[in-house]
Image: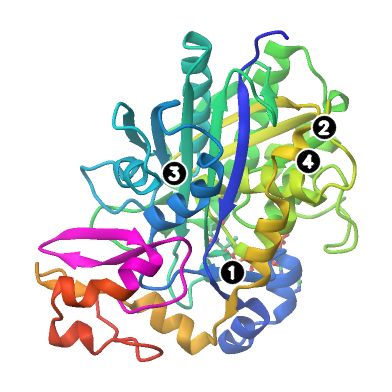
């Protein structure tokens, strides 16, 4: 078998809670069709106080890494723009929670929603140079724009874990990339802010303009044409964005930069090109997961395609505000289906608990105090791992069952935090 680098396994985890966007539309006095058709979104994942990007990422990776030996990974890469520490890499917690070898490199990567793609490209280069070794790449994010803002219905959360190797049983990444970077302010989050600042319309324009730049560079380097691709996955801030991008690419990239209006496209919701439709299914119900979202799209495509995609070429467009973008492609491995977690993913989404808009708002505003005291988090439904609380400014993580049962006596309950329980979330003004 020819040596090829690519993705050997892929799995995702979102949160256990969601808000139905029809109810959010009602609460905000907006026509529900705006969210369902204008944005293409049905619901959004919401994280409870005892989940964060570390627990999302570790829970996404756990079923996948259990198929490998703990010492097969040379690097754990963690891609996020919702990091929990300005210094320590989230990959350290994740390596620990997963029980991987300590003889391992770790790093956290940041460039908005694009960092997972630069992580993937670096991981591919690494395994090409070390063909017997593997890289675990975890992308994990919580999209927050603020209550009542235009970005609110495009919030969400999720994590995707990928094993990168030279024996890729899911996807061979075999093309040159087209990539592009420019210094612009379409979306950013200063270190002092819990919510991002965004010029949403500008970011959508840049998304389409950088699609043109990267596509042209990709075509020039690869010699491939639009027709050489069987499926396309686009970065998914909301699913209509991918539909717009794809329509422009299909119509010829020359028209992309002329604006983001809908003229010449199908009416929303009526017809989604089958080359992208399966890739949108998960995002419509989890919402944006920033760095994870393109790869959630790949997971959705592979999991939900009725057609066997073995041997088919997929084009990928990654966009990260600020901004940086990349277009590349890969070929699905023969027999890839045996590597997927289709049943687990479908069950995970089906078993989520719906939140009322009021309860979602409480969760959104929840903060643990940051004065260095001992604060356990209230117990909610989580994935396999749980953020158990803060002790002397240190974050405590563990297996969900163990920490939910044990943390209170160990951490020592502070009166204020102990009062936080069940639906009675205490809110902390920022
Ligand atoms: N029925 C159907 N569609 C409707 C509608 C209705 N009743 N009301 C509005 N819409 C459509 C609009 O026509 C628009 O579609 P179009 O752009 O194809 O014309 C879409 O819904 C969004 O409405 P609009 O009023 O234009 O935008 P907004 O002010 O609500 O903001 C975003 C939308 C995406 C800019 C905002 O959610 C945001 O800032 N999100 C975060 C940033 C982001 O995701 N950027 C993307 C690139 S990374």
Instruction: Classify mark 3 as within 8 Å of ligand 1 or not, answering yes or no.
Output: no
Question: Which comes before the other along the chain, label 1 or label 4?
Answer: 1
Vertical placement of 300 versus 143: above or below?
A: above
Q: Which residue is mark 4?
A: 248
Question: Which comes before the other along the chain, label 3 or label 1?
Answer: 1
Q: Nearer the viewer, residue 167 or 304?
A: 167
Q: Residues within 10 Å of mark 2 (few under 14, many from 20)?
A: few
Q: CA distance from mark 1 to mark 4?
A: 26 Å
Which quarter of the rendering shows the C terminus?
bottom left
Q: Quadrant of residue 426?
A: bottom left
Marks 2,4: beta carbons within 8 A: no
Q: Tell me the number on the disc at residue 112.
A: 3
Q: Which residue is mark 1?
A: 44
Q: What x and y, as percent, mark residue 415?
A: 14, 87
Q: Which residue is mark 2?
A: 252
Q: Nearer the viewer, residue 186 or 424?
A: 424
In-image side of 105 versus 323 (left or right): left
Q: What x and y, as percent, mark residue 121?
A: 52, 24
| Colouring | rainbow
């Amino acid at each position: 078998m020819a040596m090829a680098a690519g993705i050997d396994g892929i799995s995702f985890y979102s949160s256990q809670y969601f808000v139905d966007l029809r109810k959010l539309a009602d609460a905000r006095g907006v026509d529900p069709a705006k969210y369902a058709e204008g944005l293409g979104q049905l619901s959004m994942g919401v994280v409870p106080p005892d989940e964060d990007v570390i627990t999302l990422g570790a829970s996404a990776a756990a079923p996948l890494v259990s198929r490998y030996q703990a010492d097969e990974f040379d690097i754990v890469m963690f891609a996020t723009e919702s990091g929990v520490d300005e210094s320590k890499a989230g990959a350290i917690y994740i390596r620990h929670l997963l029980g991987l070898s300590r003889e391992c490199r770790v790093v956290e990567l940041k460039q908005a929603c694009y960092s997972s793609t630069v992580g993937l490209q670096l991981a591919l280069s690494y395994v090409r140079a070390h063909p017997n070794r593997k890289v675990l790449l975890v992308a994990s994010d919580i999209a927050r724009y603020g209550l009542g803002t235009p970005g609110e219905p495009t919030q969400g959360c999720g994590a995707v874990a990928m094993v990168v190797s030279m024996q890729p049983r899911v996807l061979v990444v075999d093309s040159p990339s087209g990539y592009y970077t420019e210094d612009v302010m379409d979306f950013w989050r200063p270190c002092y802010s819990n919510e991002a600042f965004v010029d949403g319309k500008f970011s959508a324009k840049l998304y389409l303009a950088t699609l043109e730049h990267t596509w042209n560079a990709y075509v020039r380097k690869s010699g491939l044409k639009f027709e050489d691709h069987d499926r396309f996955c686009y970065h998914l801030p909301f699913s209509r964005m991918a539909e717009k991008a794809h329509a422009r690419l299909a119509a010829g990239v020359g028209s992309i930069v002329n604006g983001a209006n809908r003229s010449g496209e199908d009416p929303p919701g009526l017809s989604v090109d089958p080359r992208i439709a399966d890739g949108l299914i998960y995002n419509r119900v989890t919402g944006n997961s920033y760095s994870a979202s393109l790869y959630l799209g790949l997971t959705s495509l592979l999991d939900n395609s009725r057609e066997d995609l073995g041997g088919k070429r997929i084009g990928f467009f990654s966009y990260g505000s600020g901004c940086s973008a990349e277009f590349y492609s890969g070929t699905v491995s023969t027999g890839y289906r045996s590597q997927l977690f289709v049943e687990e993913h479908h069950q995970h989404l089906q078993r989520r608990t719906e939140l009322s808009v009021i309860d979602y708002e409480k969760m959104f505003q929840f903060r643990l105090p940051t004065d260095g005291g001992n604060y356990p988090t209230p117990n909610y439904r989580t994935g396999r791992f749980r953020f158990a609380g803060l002790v002397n400014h240190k974050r405590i993580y563990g297996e969900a069952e163990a920490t939910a049962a044990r943390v209170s006596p160990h951490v020592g309950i502070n009166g204020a935090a102990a009062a936080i329980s069940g639906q009675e979330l205490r809110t902390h003004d920022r």
